Amino acid sequence: EDPDIILVGEMRDLETIRLALTAAETGHLVFGTLHTSSAAKTIDRVVDVFPAGEKSMVRSMLSESLRAVIAQTLLKKVGGGRLAAWEVMIGTPAIRNLIREDKVAQMYSAIQTGQAFGMQTLDQNLKELLQKGLITRQDARARAQHKDAFT
């Protein structure tokens, strides 16, 4: 069969990640899940699975084929229930360059300033949810990447 869209439930091992990257490179739309807390950690996790000699090639593959990373976390909602907070990273030329050049540490700043492209950090979304009264400051701080912003 020749699927247009591929969903990979869990991308935990080298073989699965390698197959997903190959499928993406050949024009398939690939959705995959990883247990990470941010977009930058997602990139690191994918690259770190590969042997040292392949990391540069994998960064190049990711920089060419990655369209977006969405990291989410569930929080208790004020008044009961739960709601999700998201970090959204779009594969803009700047993001692609950071991936290719192994400058993942700079990704947070690029996401933070990339709102015009639909990007937002988890902290930005947590602040929005807090301002709307949907979550508590304590819960926002517990999930924040930069906890000092929620004191």
Image (spheres, rainbow, N blue to C red):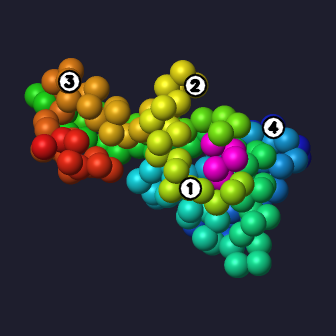
Q: For the residue marked with disc 1, what is the amino acid? A: Val
Q: What residue is disc 3 on?
A: 131
- Rendering coords of residue 48 (x, y %): 61, 70
Circle 3/circle 2 CB separation < 8 Å: no
Prevailing secondary structure of the magenta residues: helix
- Can you identify the residue that label 1 sits on? 104
Q: What kind of residue is marked 2?
A: Phe
Local crowd size for mark 3, using a 10 Å CA cut-off: few (<14), some (14–19), many (≥20): few
Mark 4 surroundings within 10 Å by alpha-carbon count, few (fewer than 14), some (14 through 19), many (20 or more):
few
Q: Which mark is residue 117?
A: 2
Question: Left or right: 63 with respect to 137?
Answer: right
Q: Which mark is residue 4?
A: 4
User: Pointers 3 and 4 in contact (CB under 8 A)?
Assistant: no
Judge the density around disc 1: few (<14), some (14-19), many (≥20) Cα neighbours within 10 Å: some
Camera-side mark, 4 or 1: 1
Q: Earlier in the sequence, mark 3 or mark 1?
A: 1
Give the extent of the magenta segment. Answer: 95-99
Q: Amino acid at mark 3?
A: Gln
- Residue 13: x and y, percent? 63, 70
User: Residue 136 versus residue 124: which sits nearer the camera?
Assistant: 124
Classify mark 2: residues with Cα within 10 Å, few (<14), some (14-19) or many (20+): few
- What residue is shown at x 78% (from left), y 55% (from top)? 61
Mark-to-mark CA distance, 3 and 1: 29 Å
Q: Earlier in the sequence, mark 4 or mark 1?
A: 4
Residue 150's label in the rendered image is none
Identify the mark nearer the N-term, 1 or 2: 1
User: In terms of image quadrants, where is residue 102?
Assistant: bottom right
Is residue 98 positioned above or below 150 on the image? below
Q: CA distance from mark 1 to mark 2?
A: 18 Å
Q: Which is more N-terminal, label 4 or label 2?
A: 4
**In terms of sequence position, does the residue under pointer 3 or pointer 4 come before the other?**
4
